[in-house]
Structures are given as structure tokens and as C-alpha cells.
Image (cartoon, rainbow, N blue to C red):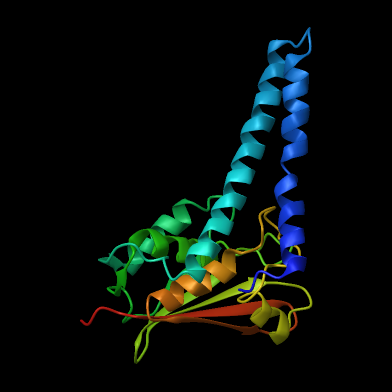
């Protein structure tokens, strides 16, 4: 993704977002008379905002590595069912609904296990619009070239243009409070593994993302 000036301005703005509550919490912690309950609340603010800032930095780092072609660091055979189970375990608030085709239960892919897990997390945990809590619905099947996973996420005013833009540029209004680069990085991970990520509108209120990856023979 080209790092144009407009997006760099937004990046600077977004990265400052967690700093204000962090600075306020530090100031209040230093004030006299802070009781134990207030201290715990302020420490929780610090922890939450530090994690948010760390996630933003990780997203930007992934984007830089993708631009340099350095996303894949190792090669191993990974069971697709395990990738799905791990993603569901990390998404307790909105667990996706995943259906396997009869011939897809034993699918395996080869690549960087950590990055493949990141790819499945991004798709199965996708929240395309702010305030939309409907879980992702996904179907996994074996295709002529390997793995095909179609994921549907609810999104008001869905369009093909919006779907395509989310794979190439930051989400205009990230619902998770991050930088909105999740799908951009996910698309880069798919390409780095010899696959691709496609997107289109599925009706007026949903986006469908289709992941295609080479599968291990057999």
C-alpha cells in the first residue's frame, strides 16, 4: 500500500489517540489522596491503552514487512481445522460460525503458522462496520487449486467498491480502534503464501471475502 501524505497524517493522529488517556492516568496516579479503587481503575486504563497502542504499532510494522516481502519467516504444514479452532478460541465475544464441506475436514496448508493464524483471525473475527455484532459466517471447502474459504460479514451500505478498497487501503472508520490495516495485511499474507484474497458485496448489507490458498496434496 502506498504511504501517501494523507494516510501518514491519519497515522500520526491515530497513534496519538491512546496517549491522552495514558497521560491523564499518569497525572492522576501522582496526585495525593488516590485510594486503592481509583488506583486500580487508572492502572486498568494504562494497561488497556498501552495494549491498543501496541496493536497499532504491530499493524504498521506488518504493513512495512509486507511492503518488503518479509512476512513469511518459516515453513510448516498446518492443519486448517486447527487454524479455525484457534481463531474461534481467540474470539470469545463474537465466535464465527464455520461450516466445513464434507471433503474439507482434513485440509492442510504449508507456510508460516503464525502468519496463517493471523490471516484466519483477521477474516473470522472481521467486523466491517462499527456497532455490528453479528458473527462472521464462513464456509471452507476444497477447490481445484486447494483451499477456498468464503467469509460473510454484515455491513450496511455494502458495495463492491468498499469491499475492494478494504484490501488495498486502511478501513475509513476502524470499528476495533486500531489503524484499520487488518485486511490489507491479511491480503498480503495470502499472496505471500501463493494465494489470494478477494472481496465483493453480498447483497446490500453484507461483504463477502474469499480466501484461496494452495493446499498440501492428499
Tally of numbered discs: 0
Q: Quadrant of residue 108?
A: bottom left
Residue occupying image coordinates x 22% and y 82% = 217
Q: Is residue 102 visible?
A: yes
Residue occupying image coordinates x 71% and y 57% = 11
Q: Position of residue 118 (x, y in %)?
A: 46, 61
Q: Split into 4 quadrants, where in the image is the N terminus?
A: bottom right
**3 horizontally vs 196: left or right:** right
Q: Quadrant of residue 3?
A: bottom right
Q: Is residue 136 visible?
A: no
Q: Position of residue 57 (x, y in %)?
A: 58, 51
In this rendered view, identify the residue nearer to me: 24 or 160: 24
Q: Residue furthest bottom?
A: 144
Q: Split into 4 quadrants, where in the image is the C terminus?
A: bottom left
In this rendered view, identify the residue nearer to me: 105 or 123: 123
Residue occupying image coordinates x 77% and y 22% = 27
**188 horizontally vs 24: left or right:** left
Q: Residue furthest left?
A: 218
The vertical placement of 189 against 179, above or below, is below
Q: Quadrant of residue 69?
A: bottom left
Q: Residue furthest top?
A: 33
Q: Position of residue 134 (x, y in %)?
A: 65, 63
Residue occupying image coordinates x 72% and y 42% = 18
Amino acid at each position: 500500500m502506498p504511504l501517501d501524505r494523507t494516510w501518514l497524517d491519519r497515522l500520526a493522529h491515530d497513534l496519538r489517540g491512546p496517549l491522552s488517556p495514558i497521560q491523564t492516568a499518569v497525572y492522576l496516579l501522582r496526585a495525593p489522596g488516590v485510594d486503592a479503587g481509583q488506583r486500580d481503575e487508572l492502572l486498568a486504563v494504562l494497561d488497556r491503552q498501552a495494549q491498543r497502542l501496541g496493536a497499532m504499532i504491530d499493524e504498521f510494522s506488518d504493513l512495512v514487512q509486507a511492503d518488503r516481502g518479509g512476512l513469511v519467516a518459516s515453513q510448516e504444514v498446518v492443519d486448517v481445522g486447527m487454524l479455525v479452532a484457534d481463531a474461534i478460541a481467540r474470539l470469545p465475544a463474537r465466535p464465527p460460525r464455520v461450516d466445513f464441506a464434507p471433503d474439507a475436514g482434513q485440509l492442510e496448508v504449508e507456510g508460516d503458522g503464525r502468519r496463517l493464524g493471523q490471516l484466519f483471525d483477521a477474516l473470522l473475527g472481521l467486523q466491517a462496520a462499527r456497532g455490528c455484532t453479528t458473527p462472521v459466517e464462513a464456509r471452507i471447502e476444497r477447490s481445484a487449486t486447494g483451499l477456498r474459504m468464503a467469509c460473510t460479514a454484515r455491513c450496511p451500505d455494502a458495495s463492491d467498491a468498499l469491499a475492494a478498497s478494504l484490501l488495498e487501503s486502511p478501513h475509513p472508520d476502524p470499528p476495533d480502534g486500531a489503524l484499520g490495516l487488518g485486511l490489507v495485511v491479511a491480503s498480503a499474507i495470502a499472496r505471500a503464501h501463493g494465494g489470494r484474497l478477494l472481496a465483493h458485496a453480498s447483497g446490500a448489507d453484507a461483504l463477502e471475502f474469499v480466501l484461496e490458498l494452495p493446499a498440501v496434496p492428499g
